[in-house]
Amino acid sequence: MVYFCTTELTREKEALLAKCILGLFPWEEGWEFLADEMIMFLPLEDNQGDILETFKSHQSVARPNFLDMHMALDGTVLFRDCYAKLISDDRTLETGLGLWVEFATNGIYKKAYRTQILMEEFAHFYREIGPGNQVPIEQALNYIESRVIYQDRDEDADPREILQDEPVDMRRPLVEIYRGGEVDLVDDYAPGFREAEKQGNGLAIGYDLEQILANDGHPLTIKDHGSDH
């Protein structure tokens, strides 16, 4: 499941969000779309601050979800849904770096990685980490830890340090920043998107997200996070 936790959704940010969404296609023949559900955290102003510290509260406390939330004998709020989440926040919109997070039952994050959505390998990571397989994120994304920049980390470094992939300039056209060979299929998945980017100097300003075609060619849908409980 993918969560959009931006602090505002201007026409410019919506154009950046469209690129993040297009990164959720495996760019293979057919209409497969990686995300079963995409949730928008509303109201947007509640997404201010460190999303890692507030995510579980926004997900299941602000609009009570008792399928996830329960209370220990000492009054501590605990959560059942500790599966890895993919979060797109304001930083994701500017860099393409999606935030993979694994939470503990107390709602505090255990592991967090920022991986580049706009690359061919992302589809493989999503399939391993996402619904169904649930491979631990550190196992699926261990290539980040093996990069030279992290090889000399101090042994006493905080295990919750957020490792990250290389950012891209999301204001450039999609076909210029995507790392992979099949991105031309964007014309099938998002008719008119490249033309809109050209008119907007790299940003498809005014492009309706529902013009993006997901599974079986149906219009894309994004739900309010309170609509499923």
Image (cartoon, grey):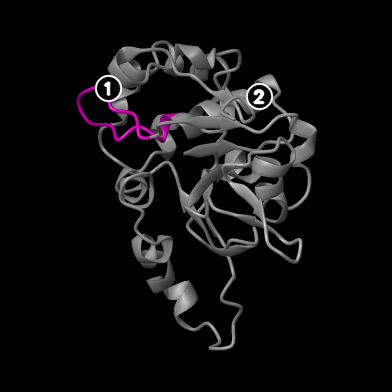
The picture places residue 180, in percent across and down from the top left corner, at 30, 41
What amino acid type is highlighted by mark number 1? Trp
Q: Nearer the viewer, residue 145 or 35?
A: 35
Q: Quadrant of residue 140?
A: bottom left
Of residue 186 and residue 162, the one placed in the foreground of this image is 162
User: Is residue 173 visible in this depiction of the protein?
Assistant: no
Residue at 31 percent of width and 48 percent of height: 121
Name the residue beneath numbered marker 2: 12
Q: Which residues are magenta?
A: 22-34
The answer to whether residue 160 of the structure is visible from this angle is yes
Q: Is residue 54 above or below residue 13?
A: below
* Number of the front mark, 2 or 1: 1
Horizontal placement of 32 versus 174: left or right?
left
Q: Position of residue 200 (x, y in %)?
A: 58, 18
Going 48% across and 75% down the picture, which residue do you hit? 150
Instruction: State the residue at coordinates (30%, 35%).
Output: 26
Q: Dot 1 corresponds to which residue?
A: 31
Mark 2 vs mark 1: which is more N-terminal? 2
Can you give x and y, in whole percent of width and height, for residue 97 in the image? 53, 48
Query: The residue under label 2 is which amino acid type?
Result: Glu
Q: Residues within 10 Å of mark 1 (few under 14, many from 20)?
A: some
Give the main secondary structure of the magenta stretch: loop
**Left or right relative to 141: residue 66:** right
Q: Quadrant of residue 170?
A: top right
Q: How many neighbours does mark 2 have within 10 angstroms: few (below 14), some (14-19), or many (20 or more)?
A: some
Image position of 57 with respect to 214: above or below: below
Label 1, secondary structure: give it: loop
Q: Position of residue 75 (x, y in %)?
A: 76, 61
Inter-mark Cα distance, 2 to 1:
27 Å
Count of numbered badges drawn on the protein: 2
